[in-house]
Image: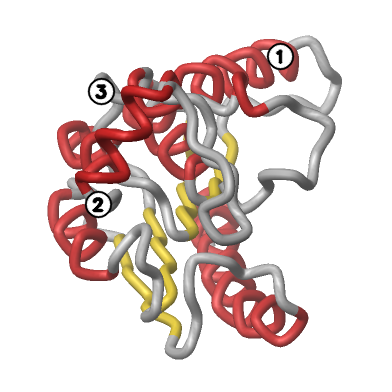
Amino acid sequence: MGSWFRSEGVQTEATFYYHAEDLEDVVEWSRSQAWFEEQFWLLGYSLGGLAAGTYAAAHAKMVRGLMLLAPVVSGGHLKRRVPWPLRWWWRVRGRVRGIGRWNLPPWSFMDSGWNYDLQRVSRRLIMPVLVVVGARDIITRPRVLRRLVAGVCSSDKRLIVMEGIGHSFDRPGTMGQLDAVLRPWLATQLEKVLTKTTGM
């Protein structure tokens, strides 16, 4: 969602369904590449976090580790974050323009999301999981992600709440803070893999 108006794509294809399908397609394409490995790490942000988590739950043995940045937990949860008068207007009109600096995508964006729910499949997440969210995030609130992480089956799971940050991580200072969180976690995970591989 943070990439709206920053890519060459069209909003009609910014749906839960297409994000999940695109990830499946990318992984299948990767299988034909020389650099493909049977186990890999996945990282997803916002709506991409829902797609990455859904994929990881369905293909747990393929995903070595999962990083979710301010992930949308479910279509239903995101819908509830929208005030009901706006939600009603959105559904009746099909799309809404001029909400502050935003033009909301077609209602089909919401309508495609009912079958996607990370909370419902969290027990299938058996790989190391790192979830990062801003303390000021009004789209994916930290308390919702605490419940998500609590439901993850892996013993190697962690939630980090970054103070003073909203839903977006794209400011220069914020990117540095995010790097300081992700880099040590990845280094630790890589060290575990190397230790297991070498038997040292």
Dots 2 and 3: beta carbons under 8 Å? no
* Amino acid at pointer 1: Arg
199 vs 74: above or below: below
Disc 1 or disc 3, which is closer to the eye?
Answer: 3
Image-quadrant location for residue 143: bottom left
Disc 1 or disc 2, which is closer to the eye?
Answer: 2
Disc 2 or disc 3, which is closer to the eye?
Answer: 2
* Amino acid at pointer 2: Pro
Image-quadrant location for residue 180: bottom right
At a point 67% along the width and 44% down the height, the residue shown is 4
Question: x and y percent of residue 120 in the render?
Answer: 15, 33
Kindly identify which residue carries mark 2.
Answer: 83
Dots 1 and 3: beta carbons under 8 Å? no
Question: x and y percent of residue 50 in the render?
Answer: 41, 38
Dots 1 and 2: beta carbons under 8 Å? no
At a point 71% along the width and 14% down the height, the residue shown is 31
Q: Secondary structure at mark 3?
A: loop
Q: CA distance from mark 1 to mark 3?
A: 30 Å
At a point 23% along the width and 45% down the height, the residue shown is 85
Kindly identify which residue carries mark 3.
Answer: 114
Q: CA distance from mark 1 to mark 2?
A: 43 Å
